[in-house]
Amino acid sequence: MTDTNDSEFPDFDTMTPADFERYLPDFFAASSNGRVSSDPKLQQFLADNPDCAALVRDLEAIAEAARAILEPVEEPSDLIWDNLQKKLQAEAVAMKPDHKN
């Protein structure tokens, strides 16, 4: 849900698509869940303006994908790091000019 203060935004009943596009970054910023489409104040406007609704869907999908990319990934376990270090050390020894097979 968007925590929109009605005095900050145009009248939702008379808002034009141009108004919507101008205020869209503010709608996203005011959203508590990152989903402008779930704001009850905008439901009718989005239903009446399919191009604006499509824009919101696209932007929400992009934002969701960006969040997924930026989510922290689990660090490899100590065992993996130890094995990697051992392999790198073995390769370094094998690459020394005075090393004989």
Image (cartoon, rainbow, N blue to C red):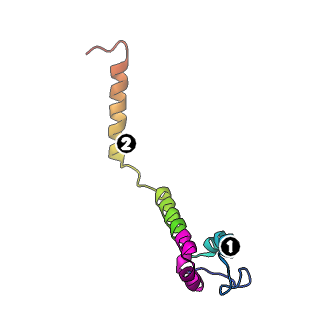
| SS for callout 1 | helix
Magenta stretch containing residue 45, yes or no?
Answer: yes
41 is higher (above) or lower (below) than 32: below
Q: Secondary structure at mark 2?
A: helix
Residue, x 57% and y 78% (percent of image)?
49
Q: Is residue 60 left or right of residue 21?
A: left
Circle 2: residue type: Trp
Residue at mark 2 to residue at mark 1: CA–CA distance: 54 Å
Give whichever of 92, 40 is nearer the camera.
Answer: 40
3, 80: nearer the viewer:
3
State which quadrant residue 96 falls in. Answer: top left
Where does the magenta region start and end? 34-56
Q: Nearer the viewer, mark 2 or mark 1?
A: 1
SS majority, magenta: helix
Q: Position of residue 58 (x, y in %)?
A: 51, 66
Q: Which quadrant does the N terminus fall into?
A: bottom right
Judging by the rendered image, the residue that carries numbered circle 2 is 81
Q: Quadrant of residue 100?
A: top left
Image spot of residue 77 (x, y percent): 36, 49
The residue beneath circle 1 is 18
Q: Position of residue 20 (x, y in %)?
A: 65, 75
Q: In the image, which disc is placed on residue 75? A: none
Residue for point 65% across, 87% down: 13
Q: Which one is in front, 55 or 23?
A: 55
Q: Is residue 100 above or below residue 24?
A: above
Counting other residues with Cα less than 10 Å from the Cα at mark 1, is it few (<14), some (14-19), or many (20 or more)?
Answer: few
Q: Residue drawn at (37%, 42%), measured in percent from left and top?
A: 81
